[in-house]
């Protein structure tokens, strides 16, 4: 069977994303669990685009072993309110091509900017953040790029939207330390589950570097750790794996999971990220007594 992953009909759904992270940066070890919730509505389905609204309902840091994570989360939440209501057009490749509520977003930035300027006088980091975001919010292309990098797009449109299944493709993207570009090779394939209805489809994603990671990669990727660890001895394992379940009639995502691992040294230098994405029907079941009883037994 060769189907492309796309939204085919209008629908509304609420989604919950759980992110588990485990990062070791030589002398620093950070683990965390966070939860995000969205209300997602498909308003219009055309041949070349879908029109959607994405509203952030919640963004909570559930667990953290390091105070630095809490500080970063607080700053992230301050800026995420700027994107908590998005009205977009998305093309058949899963790219946001037009922001339809740009006036509202810029209005939110004006309010946030005024609040930040009151406390920025003696804080160069906040001053830099104001300048950086001022440039972004005055430029629709930069704003779209920022939207494209958020977690909802990562889960809903990441690498499968608009693709044929099965298929293989290549991409250039950063490693998971976000420090060096990597030439990636990805594969998509169908998977079956006899417990699912005939209207449901499962797609599996697997990705790894398409060429051998060379000395140039190691010098760029881990330069910030060069004084703490011998980067010449590193042998990085880099992979991305995902499983997506969706309703084939509408294109509505039902649930998904995605793991990203970059292990340069299994004891001293790695990042392990796990994303678990549930529609409300699945999330409510996972939280139910029935599911918890089944899991215990």
Image (tube, grey):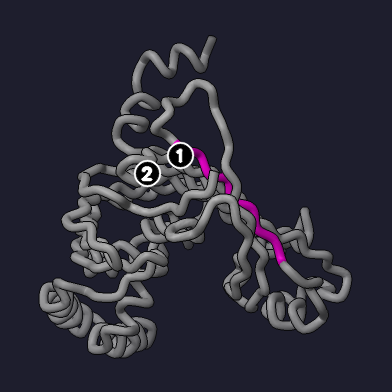
The residue to which callout 1 is attached is 245
Check residue 207 for magenta coloring: yes
State whether residue 99 is above or below residue 194. below
Check residue 58 for magenta coloring: no
Q: Is residue 232 visible?
A: yes
Magenta span: 201-209
What is the x, y in percent for residue 266? Answer: 77, 54
* Number of the label disc, if any, that sits on residue 179: none
Q: Nearer the viewer, residue 293 or 93?
A: 93
Q: Nearer the viewer, residue 142 or 270?
A: 142
What residue lies at 51% left-to-right and 17% top-to-bottom? 295
In terms of secondary structure, where does tag 2 sit? strand
What residue lies at 72% left-to-right and 62% top-to-bottom? 269
Is 144 on the left-hand or right-hand side of 41?
right
The residue to which callout 2 is attached is 253
State whether residue 189 is above or below residue 295. below
Question: For residue 192, which quarter of the picture?
Answer: top right
Quadrant that contains the N terminus:
top right
The rendered magenta stretch, by its main secondary structure, is classed as: strand
Quadrant that contains the C terminus:
top right
């Amino acid at each position: 069977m060769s189907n492309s992953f796309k939204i085919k009909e209008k629908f509304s759904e609420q989604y919950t994303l759980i992110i588990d992270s485990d990062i070791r940066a030589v002398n620093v070890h950070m683990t965390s669990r966070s939860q995000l919730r969205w209300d997602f509505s498909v308003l219009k389905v055309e041949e070349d685009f879908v029109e959607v609204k994405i509203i952030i309902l919640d963004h909570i840091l559930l667990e953290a072993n390091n105070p630095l994570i809490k500080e970063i989360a607080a700053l992230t939440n301050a800026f995420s309110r700027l994107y908590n209501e998005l009205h977009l057009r998305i093309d058949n490749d899963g790219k946001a091509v037009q922001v339809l509520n740009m006036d509202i977003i810029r209005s939110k930035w004006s309010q946030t900017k005024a609040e930040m300027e009151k406390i920025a006088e003696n804080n160069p980091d906040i001053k830099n953040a104001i300048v950086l975001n001022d440039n972004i919010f005055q430029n629709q292309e930069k704003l779209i790029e920022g939207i494209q990098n958020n977690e909802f797009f990562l889960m809903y449109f990441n690498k499968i939207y608009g693709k044929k299944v099965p298929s293989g493709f290549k991409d250039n993207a950063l490693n998971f330390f976000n420090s060096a570009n990597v030439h990636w090779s990805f594969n998509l394939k169908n998977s079956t589950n006899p417990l699912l209805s005939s209207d449901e489809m499962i797609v599996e994603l697997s990705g790894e570097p398409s060429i051998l990671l060379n000395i140039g990669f190691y010098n760029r990727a881990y330069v910030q750790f060069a004084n703490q660890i011998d980067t010449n001895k590193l042998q990085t394992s880099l992979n991305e794996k995902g499983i997506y379940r969706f309703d084939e009639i509408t294109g509505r995502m039902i649930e998904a999971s995605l793991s990203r691992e970059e292990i340069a040294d299994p004891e001293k230098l790695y990042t392990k990220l796990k994303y678990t994405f549930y529609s409300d029907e699945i999330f409510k079941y996972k939280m139910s007594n029935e599911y918890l009883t089944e899991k215990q037994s």
